Image (spheres, grey):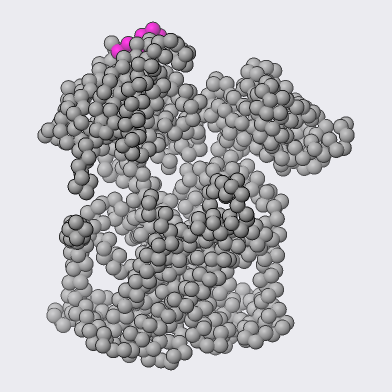
Amino acid sequence: MSAVINENAGSLDDVTDGAISIKDVVKIYDPDGAAVMAVDHCSIEIPAGEICMIVGPSGCGKTTLLNAIAGFHGITSGSIHLDGELLCGPQKPQAEPGSDRIVVFQNGALFPWKTNLDNIAFGPMMAGKMSKAEIYEKARGMMADAGLSGTENNYPGEVSSGLRRRVEIVRALMNDPKVLLFDEPYRALDSLTKSVMHEALLEIYYRNKVTIFFITHDLEEAIFLGHRLIIMSSRPCKPKKIVEVDIPHPRDYSVLTSTRFREIMNEAKDVVHEEAQKAFEAGEKEG
Amino acid sequence: MPDPANNSEILRALKSAMPFQMVPDNLIQEIAGICTQQSYDSGQKIYDLGDVADDVFIVVSGSVQHVLSTQTDAGKHEKTMRGGDVFGWAAVLEGQSTRLAVTVSIEPTQVLRINGKGLIQVFKSEPAVGDVVMTRFATLINREFYVPRSIADQVPSFKQALGASSLQGSEVTTMALTVYRISTWIKSPRPYLMLIGFAFFLGFWMLSVEVWQLPRFVDMPGPTEVFTEWFSEDPYYGLSVYTPEYYKHIGISLRRIAFAFFLATGLGVPLGLFLGWSKTFREFIFPLFEVLRPIPVLAWVPLAIIIFSGSETPVVFLTFLASFFATTLNTMLGVESIDESYSRAAYCLGASRWQTFVHVVIPGAMPYIFTGLQISIGVAWFSLVAGEMVSGQYGLGYVINTAYMMIEYPKIIIGMITLGVVGYTTSAMVRMMGDYLMQWRVRELALGDN
Amino acid sequence: MTISKFTDKLFSRAALRGIVAIGIFMVFWEVGARSEEWFGHRFPFIGLVPPPTDVFVSWTGLIADPSYWQSWYMSFLRVFGGFMAAMIVGIPLGLLMAVNRTFYGMAFPSFEVLRPIPPLAWVPASIIFWPTQELSIAFVTFLGAFYTIVINVLGGAKSINKQFLQAAQSMGASQWDIFRRIVLPATLPSIVVGSAVGMGITWEVVVAAEMISGGGSSGGGAGGGLGFFIWSSYVGGSYEQIIVGMISIGIAGYISSELLRQLGGLLTPWLKTR
């Protein structure tokens, strides 16, 4: 494992695909005639291969932005490009979901009726470009790399939640996506499992560098994983402060106790707290 | 040899541990002989990573924090061990001489230490028991930590014949769980209470009808009369387990049920799937469905007789109709119950609409479909009996009704009991079919129960 | 505002589609039923059914007929009686099985052995046992709802969140308090669900029992309930009235379920907030 992780781990120079450009995106929901602005003129540039952490209180509209990139719903105005290609914009309000942008869901969306191996093989099986044997071989290889050997024939319901998240990430990576979209995937995990998952995610990232768009409300998680934090204001959702995390990669858990980590934490904390307070006073419910 | 009081405490502690629950008493005594008791203060380390793995531990009282080394690649690293829990199983693993975890007592704790090598020695004399205990060890390790099979496979096997195949992780879980459940069921008061309940029921029936001859009850057939008729080689009313007539009735009822049930499933499941899947289709068809559904199936009897001439088709049609509504409705609800993120995930992974239907919608709705089929087979029998009583030749409902007309009362009860048995068997078959098709669910539930 | 919402809903695409589908169904039925008259060739199956217009005409004739309404009344009375009896016996039995393990161990297996016997199979035995036909119909009706109610109450009471009980205990509640203030209200939603299902079965059973036993003690004629109304229409050859009877039972069943649903909503107000 450690052989793969070299000094180059944090560098984005070798990543060519997966730059996301979000320009002036507005999303207005219109349930029962009462317009609610979920995202307000939001512009974010994410270079290829970056781990970009979107931080904000629960229910601030971060997921709306993620769903727009993934193509689950449309936007009201503005545009989103991936590597210069239009995903959605004025002429095309909703992007097509596709295997270049894969979502890792909040509560996990491994198919409970498929074994871990079949879950991981799902994307290529649907594409039908490789033979079944090739797909399974690749899947087994990737599972072994991620420390998942021995659970191929287990169903997701039989393994721990931490393991399920790892399987889900491997399932996404099987499709060689340009972007991974994480929707608070570790929210339900206890802090100990979470810490193990963070290191595992970074390890996977160092091996397969893809752009990561990661939504969270956990500041520690954000600083530990991210190249950059984008702190969002609560409803309507809009970038409020950008914090560069200049802690060198590869990172491990010793980072958490470093002075630099504390400094960045302090820099970000006040803004996050202020937004959380606003969200709380606005009566935003959890979820 | 420890003093007797102490010995009984050790025995109790051993029997409280899941892997040892099925060990016969003589062997438990032998194992108790190699046990030692030890207590730890709060916060005291019991063993550390890399220590020599000599003993297996059973918690008697208190609790112990058990943290597995990250090198084990376990799915879960931490667990608090309490009374009856077993840890330190590295001592019985083949090819593992050092500890894989750190354990610290988190309150004043009493444990039982069993020497690993000694334990294996004991089991060599009783390989069958040894395998059961080791199988349970493997189950335990797998269940609590989700360790890779490479570790669980190091659990020794005593009988080569049983050996490798029975120690494969997941099969072990289901097999051992079944054995475990049966053994706990036998040991619990449940089977005995059940017998008492049956005795009460039969006793009341017998006393009220045959002994005390209470008013009203005296007209009813009593249990002796019913059972002697039922199992008589020369039945007075011509119907017993020895007459071919009896099986003809069962066979004909079953044939009607099978035909109606399979037709209803074949039509209802696809219709339900499409109703749930396509909003347009649902908006057109579902209101019509909802308008027809409140009409009780049995109210269709006369109309069915008019439309389908003869006596056979109307009965089958009624049975079909009841099944069809239940199956269609539940299948549709099943599709609607599927979490949106599953189909979103499928789209993300590049699946087409049709592929999503096949790989997400159908399996996702499966639990509801089988709930629907369970209801469907129940209402099928319900309607069949009504249909057979009103019209039709042969069948169990017909037996009951004609027995009433001909004042052959014991036959009524024979018909009822047979209906109950056959009806229960068919619905058990549907359930087993569901379990077979939904292994993922069976395995999840097996873990959830414990 | 609420009115505009209501009309929005009425004229929404979904409602229109439903109406279109039902309309097509009615036209198909009318044409099929009159096929012999119009085309000289009778369509299979549907050609034997009386056409909806005839059904409607027959219905308008019946509306002024008190014996038709007497059938409604008789069926409602039986459904209500059997259903109430099932609630009165079934709810305490289910709760008792849920709280007392010994009783559960003794009673539940016998209960499970009897359950697969369809309620209608009890009709002859019931007629032999009970002194009047009316009582025997009531007993079979009771059985229909009974199993469902017991199973739901038992399931509901057994799945109560243990933390509720622990919280009550820690606040010093007595056993009786726990039963009355925690177990009973926590089981209410299951009771409501169970009775809704039970109500459906009750109608099925009443209709069938009325058909099988020939109308009950009040003697033949239209006094025997809607099930008997259908059966006597069939015997008397007035096929339009069979359909009138079917639709009437459908409406009656729907009204009962709706009443029960409203009542359930009143009894469990806390479920609405979620």
- Residue A162 magenta-drawn? no
State whether residue B91 appears in this view.
no
Q: Quadrant of residue A128?
A: top left
- Residue A6 magenta-drawn? yes
**Residue B71, percent across and down?**
55, 20
**Residue C65, percent across and down?**
28, 89
Seen at 23% across and 38% down, the residue is A73
**Magenta residues, start to end:** A5-12
- Is B346 displayed left or right of B225 in the figure? left
Q: Quadrant of residue C52?
A: bottom left
Viewer-proximal residue among B439 and A221: A221
Viewer-proximal residue among A74 and B438: A74
Seen at 48% across and 70% down, the residue is C145
- Is B347 displayed left or right of B260 in the figure? left
If the image is split into quadrants, where does the N terminus of chain C sit? bottom left
Viewer-proximal residue among A274 and C213: A274
Viewer-proximal residue among B154 and B280: B280
**Residue C202, percent across and down?**
44, 73
- Is C151 displayed left or right of B159 in the figure? left
Counting the numbered discs, the total is 0
Q: Residue furthest left?
A: A91
Seen at 33% across and 85% down, the residue is C69
State whether residue C122 appears in this view.
yes
Placement of B444 over or under C18, stated as above or below:
above
Q: Quadrant of residue C220?
A: bottom left
